[in-house]
Image (cartoon, helix red, strand yellow):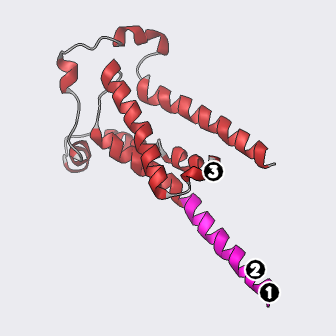
Amino acid sequence: MKIFVKIVLSLFMVLYLLILTKLILFKTFSITEMNGHISFSHGRYWGSHNFIPFKTIGHYLFLADVNPSIRIENIAGNIIGFVPFGLMLPLLSKRFSQLKSILIATFCLSFAYEILQLLFELGSFDTDDLILNTLGGVIGYLPIKLFYIVFKKNGTIRSQTKGQ
């Protein structure tokens, strides 16, 4: 049964990563149109990136000229998009049972997407996306950690009452 659950979770993870890749890297075009994006040009594209932490977040939160739906899509979307990653990773491997490992794994996945966007002109590199995506992974991890804490505590209580 445990192996079956791991296989199903692994399949969900692969499906999730495929969907996430489509949403992040190929949101405006299909994979077959990618040839036109491998150009490394030095035009206006390179000026559209954000390397300053909290610049985009501050812009969306505190400037009135931004449409509320764009605010929600950018901030909440970046967080929500990585919640499943933080949720599934500790269930797939004990190596990801600590917050630090989830932080590193989520940051690395997010950084890989941002670098791919930068190099292949598939979007814009945004440091704030790294922050929000990593936060999403942590939010996904927290219910799993809470479950393990409660389960471990209840298991300890059961073993103590059996001994009395």
Measuring 24% from the left and 42% from the top, which residue is drawn there? 56
Q: Which segment did they paint magenta?
A: 143-164
- Residue flagged by tag 1: what amino acid is it? Gly
Residue that extends furthest to the front in the rendered view of this protein: 95
Measuring 70% from the left and 81% from the top, which residue is drawn there? 157
Quadrant for residue 40, please give it: top left
Where residue 130 appears, x then y in whole percent?
Answer: 35, 42
- Which residue has dot 2 on it? 159
Query: What is the spatial separation of the Cα atoms under label 3 and label 2, in whole angstroms?
Result: 24 Å
Under circle 2, the secondary element is helix
Mark nearest the camera among 3 and 2 is 2
Quadrant for residue 109, please give it: top left
Q: Is residue 161 left or right of residue 149?
A: right
Residues 35 and 67: in front is 35
Is 149 contained in the magenta span? yes
Could one spot residue 75 in this view of the protein?
Answer: no
Where residue 71 appears, x then y in whole percent?
Answer: 31, 43
Q: Is residue 26 above or below residue 16?
A: above
- Which residue has dot 1 on it? 163
Check if mark 3's residue and mark 2's residue have beta carbons within 8 Å: no
Quadrant, the C terminus: bottom right
Where residue 91 appears, x then y in whole percent?
Answer: 63, 50
- Which residue has dot 3 on it? 91
- Residue flagged by tag 2: what amino acid is it? Ser
Mark nearest the camera among 1 and 3 is 1
Check if mark 2's residue and mark 1's residue have beta carbons within 8 Å: yes
